[in-house]
Amino acid sequence: MPASTASNPTRSNALTVTTPSDREIVMTRAFDAPRRMVFEAYTQPEHVSQWLLGPEGWTMPVCEIDLRVGGPWRYVWRHPNGKEMEMHGVYREIAPPERVVWTESWGPEWPETINTVTFTEVDGMTTITITVLCPSKDVRDAMIKTGMASGVSVSFDRLATILRRMINGVIVSTHRELVITRVFDAPRELVFKAWTDQDRLKQWWGPKNFTTPVCEVDPRPGGAVRIHMRGPDGTIYLMLGFLREMVEPERLVLDSYTPDAEGNPLFKVTNTVTFEEHGGKTKLTVHASVTMATPAAAPALAGMEQGWSETVDRLAEYVTSRRAA
């Protein structure tokens, strides 16, 4: 007889867990949102990194998703005490917005599983069904004993919150992108340090006539970033985020967001910065991709190109002056 850890699966806040066979674990929950939106929230890294967190206190500094058949995915979680957990796999089937199949591995101590996720919409409600196929009954039983149902339930509560925000227009996908390339007459190591050393960063960060009274950078993958920019009229613009990747002196990936008065994101940006040797100089490429935005963010986004252009101008002045010193 299949086991169940919850009842009434039609409720949007109820997780049902069953074991229909010796090798399967099936988890089901319904959400009050259309299927296309639930699929997006389940497969896009800017959303997944906000809800797939498990117990309180954990963060997801790495959320890599290559959503194509054969594409890899990789998640890394970090606890405040420094402990990390990693999970990875490969996509086997993708049929938006109905179905995704992937392999999942927690490392050598856990055998690989095959996970199938389906999205079914009825009367505006979307039901997510996750089927985990284990290599044996012993593995299935061991996974259940880890408390996975509790972790999934907590994460799905966060997913429900994300979906409510998306429905209310708080999160709007913009897909706005900006690419700036510049060659600096300075060595790559110097230009890289200008981005990762907070004392150097504060000397050039921001558009023309802006200052940076607060500039805090933890220069490591997963490290937090907090910047306050003061405009010419005294207005403070806050930027928060973390370094998703840091490969010295070649590449940085910074996920950042600007909060509103209540602390909710106005917009989020993934900034990918590459540093290339260029005949004794440094070729810098900044790729800024807006991953979410609210309607209230429109004025700020309208000035994104000018803001980045002036910021890179200030960087050029800084690294040139430092080289000459």
Image (cartoon, helix red, strand yellow):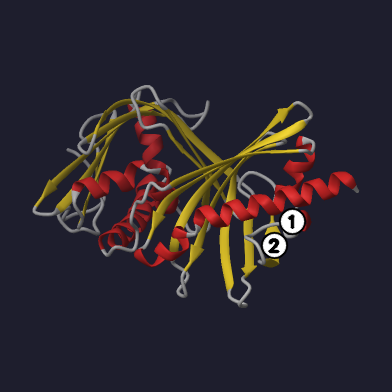
The residue positioned farthest toward the bottom in the image shown: 234
Q: Which numbered dot is residue 157?
A: none
Q: Which numbered dot is residue 198?
A: 1
Q: Which residue is mark 2?
A: 215
Between residue 132 and residue 62, name the one nearer to us.
62
* Rendering quarter of residue 294: bottom left
Above-or-below relation of 144 to 259: above
Q: Position of residue 183 (x, y in %)?
A: 69, 37
Confirm or deny contact between disc 1 and disc 2 (CB under 8 A). yes
Above-or-below relation of 214 to 193: below
217 relative position to 2: left or right: right
* Mark 2: amino acid: Cys
* Mark 1: amino acid: Gln
49 relative position to 121: left or right: right
Residue found 49% across the figure and 66% down from its top: 259
- Is the residue marked by circle 2 packed among few (<14), some (14-19), or many (20+) residues within 10 Å? some
Between residue 238 and residue 40, name the one nearer to us.
238
Kind of element beneath mark 2: strand
Kind of element beneath mark 1: helix
The residue positioned farthest toward the left in the image shown: 123
